[in-house]
Image (spheres, rainbow, N blue to C red):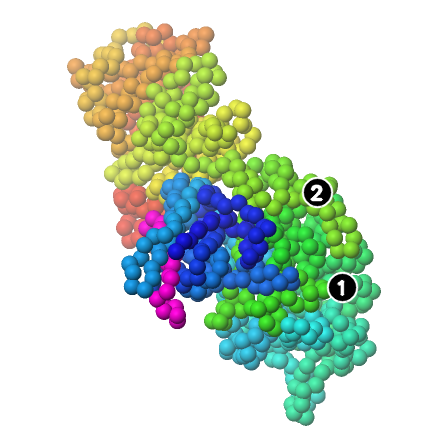
Amino acid sequence: MKLKLGIYDSSFKHVKNNKTISYKTISNLCVAKEEAFAFQVMLNSNDDFFCQLGDLNDIHYLGLNNKIRIELEVEESLKDSFKISFIGYIQDDNKDYIGDQILNQNYMHIEEEQLLWIDGKIPKNFNKDNIEIKLKAYYTKEYEKEKIIAEKSVKIEVLNYIVKSAKESEFFLDLWQHPCNWARYYEVPYYSEEHFYIIDNFLEQMSKLGQKVIDLIVTDYPWAGQRCYQVYENANNLFEMNIVKVFKKDRELICDFSNLDRYIDLCFKHNINKEINLFGIIGNWDAFKFGSPLKDYKDAIRINYYNEDEKVFDYLEDKNDFAKYLKLLFDHLEFRDLLDITKIIVDEPDNIEVFNENVDFIKKSSGKKELKFKCAIHHQEFFEKCNINIENLSLNTCELINNIDKLDEIKKELENKSGYLTWYSCCFPDKLNIFLESPLIESRLKGWFTYYFNLDGFLRWSYGIWPGDLFNNATYKKDKWKAGDMFLVYPGKDMKPIDSIRCRNLLFGIQDFNILKDMEDKLGKEEVYKEIENLLGKKSEMKFLGERKIKMNYSISHEKYIKLRKNLINRVNPRSAKPEEFERVISLINKVFRDLRGHKPTMQQEFPLLLNKDNIENMIVISKDNKIVSAVNYVIQDITVQGNDIKVAAIGAVCTDPDYEGNKYASTALDYVEDKMLKDGVDMVSISGTRTLYTRRKCSLVKNFNKYITYPKDKDINLEIKEYDKAYLNEIIKIYNQNSTRFLRTKEQFETLLESATIPWGNFTYKKLVVFRENKVIGYIILRIIDDETLKGEIREIYIDSRYNYEVVQYIANKYNLEYVIQNIHIKDFINQPNLFDEKKLSYLDGSIKIINYENLCKNLYGYFNQYVDRDFLNEIEFRTTDNKYI
């Protein structure tokens, strides 16, 4: 038996037995961490076979005939990050069978070509740049041992970038819910326990997409069943019922809001809580053909109620009763403190006069509460004349393109009302839609165009309603609706939705939206727009053609979008340098700090602990055009504070190639570095420099040093000053370790630092001096000599008894012909603080500091605090960080 495997990207749409459609196979993917992604696999055999997924054994009812088992081979840490599914096929309007359902079953009898869907997600703590997935097909028949008959590999490049989940996204996803259709499909009573179980399942799936809106249908048949009563082919009942139970007793109107409350609570449980939409109290459909029981009212309001006095069902006919109903409804939402997030929605209104009149009635009936309205619009005249307090607006694709020059103005007006601007596609136009016949990439492009048009999100009129014989024929109202228009998911046998490839691509597009927004923060909107315009087309060339048609020229190449996305991420994507890149990083650092200033390239020699191959993990870079263009480097060292150890990171050699400045690379790398340091257990960071790059990040300037100036004096002293010799090293280390607060250094590190800190560069030379008294080492000094017309001295490190400090520094200044010597001594360094000096002032050290992990820092300093504070009192103190404040 022969089997062929073909690998395709997630935008591949398979039409069974259609040989005219050609699509390129792939062998590589590029994904980010925490990104939901997928690829597809085509199985093509010369014979029928029973196919099974995964590592379990099963058998077909026809027995032990041809059997193929498909298994993914992936490294152990990622085994739970991938899932294989069969794709189910649905007949569309053209009688073609389109691969769309992502099935939950693990086995299938296959008689022709069959598509598989592979879901994946790389966890954020994964630390490799590439992985390889092997897809293996094992064949057996009767009692034969399995053997591999086909194998394919997919190489996945993992970008060091974490994607925000759709659930956390600011993308305003507004998928309309039809709960009575769900109940009707499963043949359970409306709002019964079984129905709420189904609702819970559907809401859970919607929340994974990032659904933001709770839909409450608060009258009966607001869409008049989409005129399902006129459809006889593949017929189904599409009516929606009021979620509120309405009664009359003793002629008084009574409402039971328990189902409404339970529905809201389920939505909140799944974090669907941004907005509540009330359907059915304005702009209802089909007033003439389907009628309306409410008299003397210019809207098709249908509210069924139970008359407890007469024991019959009836409909509200008096608009005064409707006013009472509205009052009860809004009072209840106000009681639940939900009125602020509630919008009254009208679906595609076309009569502005009737609309305004009904708005006035609703406001008056509410008891003059502050109500908010929302419109989904495809009628240009209504859009132009509507000037009431509409806070949220959703424009059909045609209206969107027709008003493309006004979108920013419209959005600003809505933002002033704390509102949103979204867009939607429905039964038209053909372009940029989610029909079964639509190119799959168009489902993904919802996220891209939402970003490109500067919109807040996307609305879709139905998450899931279905024709009567869905799984055999998706066609319904073919003259008005295209197959797939009604649904993004399918009803599963387990009372849970079956996802579609179209819906999954919509999810991928929302993730792309999140990436583009992040790129905007890092690169600027103009830069991102310039890049994506090449694929999405120029806005100035997009036209509304009338007759529900638009002209747009966008790419449907999945490969191009992924490549563009990768290029954007790599422009701002910090990562640890690779060992083979070490010399290139050093070259950049020397270029910025030494070469361009006319000095020798000595940075590696000057900072051997920081710029060291053993520290490559903490040398963070951004690459562009196959070059290292920015670097932020840090080294982690332990500091002891009176016997209590803390971890401190020292940042240095922060630079960007001058040819790539202005792209916020260093700032982006510092964001990454702070996150990485937190994971590395760093308590605080010190930075060599005081640039606004650091102060903007809430780094503090170190203004706790005394700056002493000492002038030369020709005098004899009872001390001997010698230049450093390696023979003195152990004595110097002993002296250094007398500091109660100091870096914990090995002997090798101490020796290395002594050498590196005195490498001459520019107009700097150095002296390493050792102080003797009666032939015993009592101190040491690292002196920088600055040749700037006159010679000046700056002490870089000193340890000497304060009694000797002044005369020793005077002596050194005189010996080396220095105009003066500066030394900066920490105000708490009592040992090295000179008793005498010529000038003194409080000063900044040329550096900045920031606490990285406040709670851990305080925990590590517990022993230090306990030396000065009673233990009982100390144990009552809680250290925490709240809203970026230390408490």
Q: Determine which residue is flagged by label 1.
A: 349
Circle 2 residues within 10 Å: few <14, some 14–19, many ≥20? some
User: Is residue 668 shown above or below 432?
Assistant: above
User: Is residue 116 shown above or below 493?
Assistant: above
Looking at marks 1 and 2 on the same chain, the residue that comes earlier in the sequence is marked by: 1
Relative image position of residue 414 (x, y in whole percent): 70, 53
Circle 1 residues within 10 Å: few <14, some 14–19, many ≥20? some
Q: Residue furthest bottom?
A: 310
User: Is residue 382 shown above or below 195?
Assistant: above
Quadrant the N terminus occupies:
bottom left
Q: Is residue 15 magenta?
A: no
Relative image position of residue 876 (x, y in whole percent): 33, 54
Amino acid type assigned to the residue bearing label 1 in the image: Pro
Residue 216 appears anywhere in the view: yes
377 or 482, which lies in front? 482
- Left or right for 365, reference 630: right
Q: Secondary structure at mark 2?
A: helix
Q: Is residue 69 magenta?
A: yes
Relative image position of residue 686 (x, y in whole percent): 39, 33
Distance between the alpha carbons at the discs numbered 1 and 2 = 27 Å
Residue 373 appears anywhere in the view: no
Q: Residue at (49%, 47%) from the top-left corner?
A: 163
Q: Secondary structure at mark 1?
A: loop
Question: What is the span of residues highlighted in magenta in the rendered image?
Answer: 59-76
Relative image position of residue 95 (x, y in whole percent): 62, 63
Q: Determine which residue is flagged by label 2.
A: 539
- Left or right for 878, reference 469: left
Q: Quadrant of residue 176?
A: bottom right
